[in-house]
Amino acid sequence: MTLLYTEVEEELRAAVRDLLTDTCPPSAVLDRAGSAAAGGTPYDAELWKALARDIGVAGLLVPEELGGAGASAREAAVVLEELGRAVAPVPFLSSAVLATQALLVAGGEVAGELLGRLATGEATAALAVSFAASPYAPPAPVASLGEDGTVTGTVTGVIGAEAADVLLVPVRLAQGVGLCAVETSPTVQGSAEEAVRVTTVTSLDLTRPIATVEFASAPARIVARAEGLELPWVWEALARGAGLLASEQLGVAEWCLTTTVAYVKERRQFARPVGSFQAVKHRLADLWLEVVGARAAARNAAALLAEAPAAGPLGDEAAVAVAVAQAHCGAVAVHAAEECVQLHGGIGMTWEHPAHLYLKRAKADQIGLGTPGDHRDALAGPAGLPAPM
Amino acid sequence: MTLLYTEVEEELRAAVRDLLTDTCPPSAVLDRAGSAAAGGTPYDAELWKALARDIGVAGLLVPEELGGAGASAREAAVVLEELGRAVAPVPFLSSAVLATQALLVAGGEVAGELLGRLATGEATAALAVSFAASPYAPPAPVASLGEDGTVTGTVTGVIGAEAADVLLVPVRLAQGVGLCAVETSPTVQGSAEEAVRVTTVTSLDLTRPIATVEFASAPARIVARAEGLELPWVWEALARGAGLLASEQLGVAEWCLTTTVAYVKERRQFARPVGSFQAVKHRLADLWLEVVGARAAARNAAALLAEAPAAGPLGDEAAVAVAVAQAHCGAVAVHAAEECVQLHGGIGMTWEHPAHLYLKRAKADQIGLGTPGDHRDALAGPAGLPAPM
Amino acid sequence: MAWDEASVAERARAFLAEHDPAAMDRLEFLRARFDAGLAWVHFPEGLGGLGASRDLQAVVERELKGTPDNRPGRIGIGLGMAAPTILAFGTEEQKKRFLRPLWTGEEVWCQLFSEPGAGSDLATLATRAVREGDEWVVDGQKVWTSSAHTARWAILVARTDPGVPKHRGLTYFVCDMHAPGVEVRPLRQITGEAEFNEVFLTGVRLPDSLRLGEVGDGWRVAQTTLMNERVAIGGTPTRRTMMGVVAETWRSRPELRTHDLHQRLLKLWVDTEVMRLTAVRLREQLAAGHPGPEGSGMKLAFARLHQELSGLEVELLREDGLAYDDWTFRRPDTVDFVGREAGYRYLRAKGNSIEGGTSEILRNIIAERVLGLPAEPRADKDVAWKDLPR
Amino acid sequence: MAWDEASVAERARAFLAEHDPAAMDRLEFLRARFDAGLAWVHFPEGLGGLGASRDLQAVVERELKGTPDNRPGRIGIGLGMAAPTILAFGTEEQKKRFLRPLWTGEEVWCQLFSEPGAGSDLATLATRAVREGDEWVVDGQKVWTSSAHTARWAILVARTDPGVPKHRGLTYFVCDMHAPGVEVRPLRQITGEAEFNEVFLTGVRLPDSLRLGEVGDGWRVAQTTLMNERVAIGGTPTRRTMMGVVAETWRSRPELRTHDLHQRLLKLWVDTEVMRLTAVRLREQLAAGHPGPEGSGMKLAFARLHQELSGLEVELLREDGLAYDDWTFRRPDTVDFVGREAGYRYLRAKGNSIEGGTSEILRNIIAERVLGLPAEPRADKDVAWKDLPR
């Protein structure tokens, strides 16, 4: 196990970064965010197609025998770093990480077939669970599967639903719980007799909004079922997703640090570069140290997730690595974005500068898949630091 | 009510400061601390006599009809600011605040007689309760009153006991609890048949060490008694003491800030005053703002304690003021002392510079009479911010 | 005469007896109130005041309670910044011309100081004013101008001599916002709104009679304006406080509470209370005639608290914190830092440490003016503005 | 020959076969080990090494495990700072003379760099060395010198030319601590102990043969020493960690736990783990031949964590935190930051952000060398040392 990047990972990063540099510069993201704010489509379908199919990021976590790349969390983490650095409006985290992880853990025939479609980029999926759900308290299903095999219920706070062809929704069964797959073909979505309705919520994060998903007797296939009320696929997907989200947060923080450093080198006040003022230098040095730590923590989480069995529960070591990475990176991304706005001065407060996109993403990511406080609390046991009685 | 200093208060401050400047410069405190560290007497008896009798600080809180000055917590707070600024090794907080407050709350004949002796400076008292006790969880009595009217038991963590002629000790009674007064005449203390033994503990705070007090069938008078296990006199003394301790912490913080500002103006590195470096300037500006807040909070606590009835329980407003003052000032004093050491560089780490006396006092005061965390927790109710369920 | 509470109250009552607001046009009432010296009693007679103590204004407000007001939120820049500057530096003609419609709200004012290249270092501003006979021709770009689109007049600082050090080559003007060459564009902020504007000045011709103060004395004149701005930003009491808003959320959503958030919230509650007490003490010092230096720190503390509290609230709200109320590109007349929803408060609070003096500049001011720490080596004090490195 | 793991292990085993530590004097064994090139394998042959890769030292340590060692804790300055500098800049005679007894521990070394007036700004140091024939006469005062009272030799930087800018007028010497005029006084710290000394140099005469490097080249030579110092301070793995110590206290005293402390402790646990992972990643980069800039930050993080954790422990302990273990004025041979009791740890940790480069200087280094931010305006670079403002 290494915390460094392998050559293969660096090649993957270069491919993703080249594509993003060409097709997803900050100005393009800003334009899309502006139109998303006015009710337009949040995701960049062209970019996603290029990423998913041409570079093949959609199938990174899918085993080769199911048509995927058979890569690991390490490679997915590198992709997330680059997507974070670009605040790219693509459903990678929602489809290729969260939904894919849920299917991998669920296993079985339906999951296999779906994973095959996801791997090729032919279809995109979303896990119909709130992005604000914490892996330590995954929500009970709010939808239910009727006797006629259709799903009914409303799930809020879902990311990537607008771009999804398949929604994976936890459901109550007559006995126990299950995970269902609901197809959202364009003819059904938005039609008069809509069985699945996806409504984008006006969101803090303009580049990855949340949506409300309403199922009204939507035809569904059962992917997996379990006794009781626990949803193992959801827990595992959220925990693994949280571990990988740390790499996205690292990418966000890195962009903010790099952009700020470049700005204060150029920006002059009092006939000196702002970056020559010691208070600014010290704050950026401290921030750099936080980002360096974020890289180590995110890499560690990715490396241990890569070693964890794809289907089984996470071991203690990997669970600790996830919690540490999230507790640290979640806060670092917000801090980096806040310093980015502040040290850009007035320009950082303007819509036309992309800093706010990173601030909004960082703040949403801080809530997503467990807050830093949730992840710290989860460490009390493994660290042997019990709470007060 | 005002948060400013009145003219009378400023005159009192000037008298105390003049005396301290003349007789208690940092070098003298350092010398005494050095000898205290080697087992010598921690308190400066001469200085205390001058303060207590000549300036009359011992009787500030004692009503005129009992021979005191009939002043209020406001004046005591001003004295504590100056004593904190000088880390003066005198038993003002232990005798003229904590013990005096316990007697004032207890009331009655014995208390009146004792207060009269304290007010003139003829006698000095100490409250035999750990300085680490929090007013929100005052300790149950660890000593007991025997049928023969003598007290037996061991109390740890007591401040000012070495200088005390009278120890006020909470005791278990056959029924209920009480507050006893035990005289510690020099002939008894340290003698072979010792009934009261005061042992100074090697302490972090060299200028106000803690002591262990052992009572072995020590003759005692009952000052007050109560049903149950609650000790109202102790609670009230600790709460009022905590409110006034904030002013001592303000004094400590002020000395640290002032001394550091003066040092960085003089000290040159890289051919510039260290205080011209922006990172240093910004840290000191932030610290200054904390100290300004500490003054407002400490004054507010003193003003509301001055308006509270001497004997009865504190009202909600005063209790909140005490908790706010402690929560803020306890942390500010430590922060100021830590910055003082750091910004003095190597010299701040040497025994010969007085900074460490303030660091040790500030750290001990952070623990004394409730930690900042205790005081914050106590605010959850009044602030309407209930804890998680 | 020396005014006191009784005589001011008497005058206000007399004014009311003669001017029934129910029977008058709103504007006529306000003009009459101005002419009666009851606009701002500490201004001189004839300029809306009585030459009385500033404290006595409260007496007027009490007596005239319920009568039409001049909607001070809408004309804050005129009242808070332009008026004191005009009073201090204007000619008699200027005072007569501008103060009455300013106070009645007939004429809205805005401020043309900041530029894209001159933020904290305002004195380096590049907008040029060149004299041509009795006129000045102004060219440049200003930014962060609130009310520019509704304003009749602006206070403007422009460079009239690039050949001297930056602080010395500036001149202060009143700018006619209806003059040809003035173009106002809304500046959208990260909240989605445009509270502010960019103002492009292209060959704008201003008569010399609109100059305020001497040629080259613009920096000194601007100091009066800025001192009033900082007081206004740091000290405005709002009905709702950020702590109050967040505490309401905390109380109403018990299921969202965690120990992490609780401990942080208690700390911020204490900090808020300490800031409140500091402000109380500061006002007492002012009232006692001993203004303390604490004012410089209030805006700093205020910005930090707003930012930390609003950030905590978004985190506390979890899924609701992922939502935003409205991204519509609007131009609001006024701003309420604690208004709207949590996401807006969070984003808007980011500006609190930038607008009206960044927190970095405020720390410099405290360090140098309050603590007396030495200034940093300065390369720009004695160099002609045109020769400064850019 | 190119050494590899097998051949080094073979050589160590051959050495052990010929030198039975049980049958030999300890010192003789160490000298023989040095002569066999097994002291530090990356040093050249004849100087205690084999000219092998530094990694292979671990092979030697493994093979010689359990044999007498040179008590590295006692001679850390010699091993960590003097030796690399002598190797890089010493003459052949100097290397031959000094390295063997340095490594065996026969001769203890100390460092005479810091002065009361030259802390962070070391290059401004004032200790003078004046040439008299083949000798140098040294006068000045040094401070923060550990082991000065047990040292045979010191590495010394002194000013040999006050007429040139401060970095250029320095020369590096080996100082004979037994020479007349060397006076060592213990320097008591806030912990009560004296880990360090003040060293007064009065007319100390050093032969020119003790000069290390060229005259005037002392700053460059000292950089080699200091680089090694910072690595040593930031990177030393200790058996017990501060987090481990505080966690033990937390576990053993359940009655002292509060939510305030718990939340702070969990945060520091995460920070500690992040620092550990950063260090792991740094070592991987070094091993891969790509030393990253992360090293500069490790000491910074280490100091902060030590200070916050030890401060929290004292607070947690309440009444026990009011006590201190021992104020006796002692001169300990070695220092253990996490040794003794909570109060000592708290006070000693304050030094972690000062000794071996203050945290302020480290932040400057990160900002300038890692982030490439511009240096501050410097007034002292090109001015003769004697003309600097004092």
Image (cartoon, coloured by chain):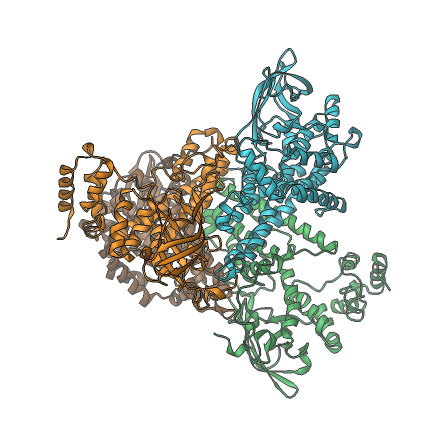
Chain colours: A brown, B cyan, C green, D orange
On the question of residue B57 being in view, the answer is yes
Q: Closer to the camera, A183 or C171? A: C171
Residue extending furthest front?
A: D133
Q: Is residue A92 above or below residue D313?
A: below
Residue extending furthest top?
A: B148
Query: Could you tell me which residue is drawn at 14 percent across and 40 percent down?
Result: D13
Q: Closer to the camera, A6 or D33? A: D33
Q: Position of residue C286 (x, y in %)?
A: 71, 55
Q: Quadrant location of residue C374?
A: bottom right
Numbered circles on residues, count: 0
Q: Position of residue C300 (x, y in %)?
A: 58, 56
Q: Closer to the camera, C349 or B212? A: B212
Q: Quadrant location of residue D215?
A: bottom left
Q: Closer to the camera, A63 or D238? A: D238
Report whether B71 appears left or right of D13: right
Q: Position of residue B252 (x, y in %)?
A: 60, 44
Q: Is residue A332 above or below residue D247?
A: below
On the question of residue C339 being in view, the answer is no
Report whether A332 appears left or right of C148: left
Q: Position of residue C276 (x, y in %)?
A: 64, 49
Report whether A303 appears left or right of B152: left
The N terminus of chain C: image quadrant: bottom right
